[in-house]
Image: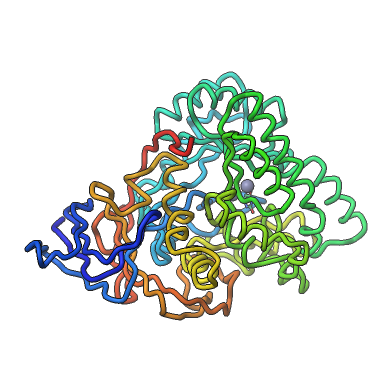
C-alpha cells in the first residue's frame, strides 16, 4: 500500500481541533502537519478535505452479528454488518462471542473466530459472553485474555439463557480482578422481570408495549446497584452495557463519586427513541430490545445526555442486533415470532450504521456536546476502555489510519431504502440528520468514497486487545 495525504481538513481528536494535513503511509498515520506543501510532503494520492472534519474512525464496542437469539439469528452477518458499519463511519467493532451452557468458553470463542474470519470489512475484536461459570471457564478466562479477549459479558437478565446468579458473578469478578480483565454487565433483574412478563401475558397483554412496561427501570437500577457492589467486594473493573435508565445512571454516578472502577455506555436508541415507539400495535416490535426504550416524560433521555456531558457515561455504542419485521432471506421469520407474545419477539434493533451521524447530529448539532467530546465518546473512550488505544480511537502519529472525513453541514434522511444493514426497516426511518460520513479509510485504504464501497470482505483483521486503559 502506498501513501495518502489528507489535505485542508479540520482534524478533530478528543483533545484538540486543528487545521492540519494528515500523511498516511501504508496502514499508519506518519505525520500531522500544518501544511504539507510548506514541508514539501507529497504522497501517491491526495484527498481534499476542505470544509470538512477529519476524525478518527468510530469504535463500536457493542455489536451482535449473527447472534443466535429467540430461535433465530441477528440478521447481519459479519460481512454485511461490518460493511454497514463502514458506511456509517465506524472502522472497529467489538462483537460478542458466546459460550453456551455446557460448552467450553474456548470452543465458543473459536466458533466466533471462525464466523468472522475473512468476512469483515473493518477490524474486529471480541468480548466473551460467559454463559456457564465453572472451574474450567474460570481457567479459560485467563486463556482468553492471552488471546486478546480482555472483557467478559455477564447477564443478570435472561434466566435459562445467558443468566448468571450472584455467586457465579462473584467468581467471574474475582477472576477478572486477578487477570486484569473487565466485566461488562447486562444489568437488569431478570428473575423479577420474568414475573412481571408472565403476569402481563396471563392478563392477555401480548403487544410489544408490554415488553417496555414489564421490564421496569427500577429493576435496571437494582441490578446496576448489585453489580457495582459485587465489583466492590471482588475488586473487579465493571462496565455497565446499554444503560437506559435514570435509576441505573444514579447508581453509576454514586459509584464513580466513591472513586470506584465503574464505567458505563449508553446507546442511540435510549438517546433518541422512547416507550411510545413500542406502542402502535405490532409495529412496536421494531423497537423491542433489552433494556427497553424508556418513558421520555420520566426524564431518562435528558439525564442520559447529561451523563454524557459530565462523563458519568463514557461511551456510546449501538448494541446492534437486527431482526427483520418480515422474513429474513437466510434466517426466515424473525420479529413475527412474537406476534402473539411480546416475550417471543427477538430482542434487538439495528444501528451500527447510524451511530456516528445520529450522535453528531443530536450531540454536536443540537449543542449538547463539543465535537471533541463527540470523538471521545464514539471512538477514543471505547478504544481506551477495551485496550485498543492508541492503535484505534485517535488520529496520531503511529496510529492506524482509520479516518473518517465528515461533512458537518451535509443533511440527509435515514431510511431502510438507502441503508446497508441487512434488515428490512430502520429504527430511525425518516429522521433528518446534519453531518454526513463522506470518506472512510480503514488502515490507510479508502473503503467508502463518492457513495461507493471500495473495500472487500477480509480487509478487517482480528484485534488482539490489551488491558483497559481507563483505570
Ligand atoms: N439485548 C438486546 O436487545 N439484544 C441482544 C442481547 C441484549 O442484551
Ligand atoms: Zn445486553
Ligand atoms: Zn448486547
Up the image or down, 468 lies above or below 77; here it is above
Residue nearest the observer in this picture, 285 or 437: 437
* Location of residue 293 in the rendering, given as x and y in whole percent from the top left corner: 70, 61
Between 419 and 340, the one nearer to me in the picture: 419
Corner quadrant of residue 229: top right
Q: Is residue 174 above or below residue 56?
A: above
Q: Across the whole image, how many numbered discs are drawn on residues?
A: 0
**Quadrant where the image shows the N terminus:** bottom left
Relative image position of residue 82 (x, y in whole percent): 42, 57
Residue sitting at x 41%, y 59%: 90
Q: Position of residue 171 (x, y in %)?
A: 63, 23
Horizontal placement of 232 versus 415: left or right?
right
Rendered residue at 54%/27% (across/down): 176
* Display colour scheme: rainbow
Q: Nearer the viewer, residue 126 or 175?
A: 175
Q: Residue furthest top?
A: 135
Q: Name the residue: 93% across, 58% down.
A: 203
| Outermost residue to the right | 203
Q: Is residue 372 left or right of residue 3?
A: right
Residue 194, percent across and down? 81, 46
Amino acid at each position: 500500500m502506498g501513501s495518502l495525504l489528507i489535505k485542508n481538513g479540520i482534524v478533530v481528536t478528543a483533545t484538540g481541533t486543528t487545521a492540519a494535513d494528515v500523511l498516511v503511509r501504508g496502514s499508519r498515520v506518519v505525520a500531522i502537519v500544518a501544511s504539507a506543501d510548506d514541508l514539501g510532503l507529497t504522497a501517491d494520492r491526495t484527498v481534499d478535505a476542505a470544509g470538512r472534519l477529519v476524525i478518527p474512525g468510530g469504535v463500536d464496542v457493542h455489536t451482535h452479528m449473527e447472534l443466535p437469539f429467540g430461535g433465530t439469528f441477528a440478521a447481519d452477518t459479519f460481512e454485511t454488518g461490518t460493511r454497514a458499519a463502514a458506511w456509517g463511519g465506524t472502522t472497529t467493532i467489538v462483537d460478542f462471542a458466546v459460550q453456551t451452557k455446557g460448552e467450553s468458553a474456548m470452543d465458543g470463542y473459536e466458533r466466533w473466530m471462525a464466523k468472522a474470519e475473512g468476512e469483515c470489512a473493518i477490524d474486529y475484536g471480541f468480548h466473551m459472553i460467559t454463559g456457564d461459570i465453572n472451574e474450567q471457564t474460570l481457567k479459560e478466562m485467563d486463556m482468553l485474555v492471552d488471546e486478546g479477549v480482555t472483557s467478559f459479558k455477564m447477564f443478570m437478565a435472561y434466566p435459562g439463557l445467558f443468566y448468571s446468579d450472584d455467586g457465579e458473578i462473584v467468581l467471574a469478578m474475582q477472576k477478572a480482578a486477578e487477570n486484569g480483565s473487565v466485566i461488562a454487565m447486562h444489568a437488569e433483574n431478570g428473575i423479577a422481570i420474568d414475573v412481571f412478563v408472565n403476569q402481563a401475558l396471563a392478563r392477555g397483554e401480548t403487544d410489544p408495549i408490554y415488553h417496555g412496561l414489564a421490564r421496569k427501570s427500577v429493576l435496571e437500577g437494582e441490578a446496576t446497584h448489585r453489580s457495582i457492589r459485587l465489583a466492590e467486594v471482588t475488586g473487579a473493573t465493571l462496565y455497565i452495557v446499554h444503560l437506559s435508565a435514570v435509576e441505573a445512571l444514579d447508581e453509576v454516578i454514586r459509584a464513580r463519586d466513591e472513586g470506584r472502577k465503574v464505567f458505563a455506555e449508553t446507546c442511540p436508541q435510549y438517546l433518541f427513541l422512547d416507550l411510545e415507539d413500542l406502542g402502535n400495535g405490532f409495529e412496536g416490535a421494531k423497537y423491542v430490545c433489552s433494556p427497553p426504550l424508556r418513558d421520555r416524560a420520566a426524564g431518562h433521555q435528558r439525564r442520559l445526555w447529561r451523563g454524557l456531558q459530565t462523563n458519568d457515561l463514557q461511551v456510546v455504542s449501538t448494541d446492534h442486533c437486527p431482526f427483520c419485521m418480515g422474513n429474513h432471506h437466510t434466517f426466515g421469520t424473525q420479529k413475527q415470532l412474537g406476534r402473539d407474545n411480546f416475550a417471543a419477539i427477538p430482542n434487538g434493533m439495528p444501528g451500527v450504521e447510524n451511530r456516528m451521524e445520529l450522535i453528531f447530529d443530536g450531540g454536536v448539532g443540537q449543542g449538547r456536546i463539543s465535537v471533541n467530546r463527540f470523538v471521545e465518546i464514539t471512538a477514543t473512550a471505547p478504544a481506551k476502555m477495551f485496550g485498543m488505544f492508541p492503535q484505534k480511537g485517535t488520529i496520531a502519529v503511529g496510529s492506524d489510519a482509520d479516518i473518517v472525513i465528515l461533512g458537518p453541514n451535509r443533511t440527509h434522511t435515514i431510511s431502510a431504502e438507502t441503508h446497508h444493514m441487512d434488515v428490512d426497516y430502520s429504527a430511525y426511518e425518516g429522521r433528518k440528520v446534519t453531518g454526513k460520513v463522506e470518506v472512510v479509510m480503514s488502515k490507510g485504504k479508502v473503503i467508502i468514497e463518492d457513495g461507493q464501497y471500495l473495500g472487500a470482505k477480509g480487509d478487517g483483521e482480528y484485534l488482539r486487545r490489551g488491558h483497559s486503559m481507563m483505570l
